[in-house]
Image (tube, coloured by chain):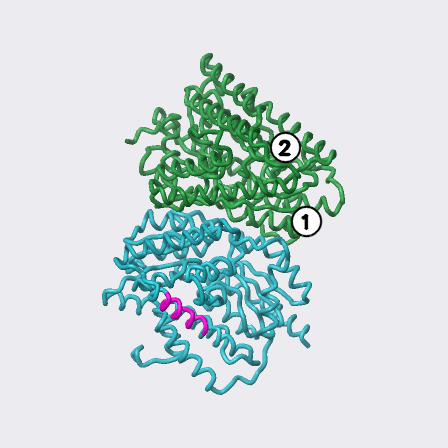
Chain colours: A green, B cyan
Amino acid sequence: MVTSSSEFAKPIRHTDAAKSVNRVLKDWYARSQEARAKGAPSAWVMASTPPEILEAFDIQAVFPENYGAVSASRGQAVHYINIAESEGYSPSICSYCRNTLGYIQERQQLKAEPPDAPLGGMGDPSMLLSVSLCCDIRIKWFQTLATRYLKVPIHIMESLNPPYGLDMTDERIKKHYIDVALAELRSLVAFLEEQTGRKLDERRLKQVIANSLVARRLLYQTYQLRKAVPSPMPSEDAFACVVPYLYMRGTSFAVDFYQKLHEEVKERVEKRIAVIPEERYRILWVGMPPWFNMGIFNYLESLGTVSAIESQYYMGTPIEVDPEKGLQALAEIAWLRSVEQHRQGAEIAPEQSGPSGDVAGLPVSLVESFARDYKVHGIIVHLVQSCRIISFGQAHYKNVLRERLNLPMLSLESDMSDPRLWNDTEIKGHIKLFIDVLGQRKGTTAVKQ
Amino acid sequence: MVPVAALTGLQKVKYIYNNRLDRVKELKSEGKRIIGYLCSMAPLEILEAAGLVPFRIMGSPQKGTASADVHIETNMCPYVRNCFARGLEGEFGFLDGLLLSHTCDSVLRLYGLWKYHLDAPFTHCVNVPHTISEPTIRFFREEIELFKEKVEQYAGQEISGPALRASIELYNANKALVKELYGLRKEDPPLISGTEMMETLVAGLSIPAREFNQLLREVKDEVITRPPKLTKKPRLLLHGCIMDKTGFVSLIEKCGAKVVMDDTCIGTRTFWNEVATDGDLLDGLIDSYFKKFQCPRTYRGRSLHRFDYLRQYATDYNAQGMISYIMRFCDCHSLDAPDMRDYLRELRLPVLIVEDDYTEGAVQSLRVRIQAFIESVTEISV
């Protein structure tokens, strides 16, 4: 195991729910390994393949993107990334992807799970499931896995979103997008029926979708509670708590998890249990976190600054669709998320509303409203070098927010999973200067009208 | 100075290549409406059929990207940033519209930013699926229909069946002429160099299709009648992302090889697929611009056979090696590179993969690697 030399490698989380996520992940990987050992259908899945459908089919899924974060947070990503690069993969490619390619390369060389594989490794899938949502790389990544490493069936679901500037009130456009979303969902179902030898249990799917909507509502309500001053739940906790939503959201476990999270945060607000007792500054975090150094948020806290809200993994306002519509409901969710995305400015992230409602990048007006509603004193923009789709537009965010808000902004550059791009001294220096600026502007929040 | 009207063939090509805005500005002053475009996954035939003039937006590596870097992070496609910089600096101020297609993440997002900052009377983005299936083909058909309707609305005229057919035939003739010119590269030594070919294509994408066709005929007449070169050199296939300047091809040729065939954006990817006219015209456009369009952004299965067309190119043009030019941060090309390398190694076709960031200095720094590669190809051939 490669250990990180950074002083930020070990984060301290605040809520019980966030603290439990490590266990959730361990159990999930263990369950997946157990199921595979029994010959149950298992898949490597690209996030935003609707987890509701996977749950309805009882597919044991592991997500290589998640494994990128897991490997980074456990100090193993550099090892895998180096292997991938020595195979000829450019250092500019998504570090999650390089992590997967290095992991599978080592696994195949050893003909066994690498001994240092975090959480016991991802194991052998019986199928690969990808989705075109969000970025080009998600297709190429799975194409590479299928070409070079994993001789199992592969399915790629198309996820199409309207480009910027389309008239989202046009019924013809709506039908155009819902029709293709529905057809692609059906194609995924047909593939899974073939792979599992079972028909889709529609009754179960409807229940799973209903669970998913409840989980979304609870998560939204929790985010509303996070507006409280002092902050009851910081970004490092939110980044952990998104795991059940992203990967298990149709399950009753996810509903329970978010019910408990909501209750816990509500109680913290009522009892004024703060992330830091003497909260001096609140910031908005834009971009992905550095999974290998999540302690950076604790460092901010040591300087009296809490990251009260973040742009990444926000699941948006609750969406009201009828779960009884089954697949149609999932297609409608994707459309409604697109409409919301366009309403708030889709010039940067038009293509990021997936089937069943994931969203990877936020419209600039929503980020602006976060700054106002969460009463932040400043914004930290984290540019992750190897994820272009999340980074593209951060400069635009800054330009627009500078016009609309009167807030200091700090840009940090590193990566989500490649710690070689991180430098403790530099990052600390930037943050200290930023906190000084916040101090000089004490009392100033997003007040520009 | 000889007036451009008096120039023909390769001299005219060189002039247009170096002054590629002249003709469209002239047309603009005559009242024509000019639509800028990037990438080749949206059918220009529809613009032409409505009386609009398509103009390929290109960058200028010697001018840098500072003005675009204010809006786009520097870890994004350097080509997209460069083109946007030119737009922001007013180089394309004569454009009446913008046509992009969802080819890759960077181009899709460029569309949003361009429209946000440089909105024009006509802007459109054709959404292109990444997979080819019955639903996505249906989706692309509807995209073409929506695009056509929007063009009609903007042009103020319906595009009739005969007008679309005539436009398709014009572009098909263009593609056929380009292929004829490519055919002259099968000779050894080739009758037209890679540098001349690229200059011709870049020049042609800067003028109306009809004028491009005339230019192609002149170039062909010229190269088949001029004294042939006598020295044979290693013959290379050039693969890669967008190249809209001759710097890289010229460097390869100055290093002692001949670029005899390509799989690049301003090359076979744009000119290789004529549109079928013996059935439904939209079906023909779908085949040409979606199903057959060769770009790694489209999923074409897990098999290494997806690179078979490269073998075919190498065989048809008797290439002894391949140089792949990958624009830095182009994820689609980068992720394909090791698979493609392994495929070509299996064929015993030497391959050199280089990464570049669309700056003049960067191209020159590749000289030593290219020279070494050409030497190794020569040794293998001997």
SS class of the residue under badge 2? loop
Stretch in magenta: B165-176
Looking at the picture, tell me which residue is in the foreground, A265 or A154. Answer: A154
Near mark 1 (Cα within 10 A), the count class, few <14, some 14-19 or many ≥20, is: some
Residue at x 74%, y 34% (from the top left corner)? A37
Characterize the magenta stretch by its predominant secondary structure: helix
Residue furthest toward the left? B30
Which part of the image, by quadrant, shows the N terminus of chain B?
Answer: bottom left
The chain ID associated with circle 1 is A
Residue at x 70%, y 32% (from the top left corner)? A35
* B328 in relation to B277, above or below: above
Q: Which residue is mark 1?
A: A149
* A394 in relation to B368, above or below: above
Residue at x 57%, y 19% (from the top left corner)? A16
Q: Which residue is mark 2?
A: A58
Residue furthest toward the top? A271
Question: Whole-percent x and y of residue B29?
Answer: 23, 66
Which part of the image, by quadrant, shows the C terminus of chain B?
Answer: bottom right
Query: Is B168 covered by the magenta stretch?
Result: yes
Distance CA(mark 2)–CA(mark 1)? 25 Å
Question: Whole-percent x and y of residue B201?
Answer: 43, 70
Visible in this render: residue A53? yes
Query: Of marks 2 and 1, which one's residue comes earlier in the chain?
Result: 2
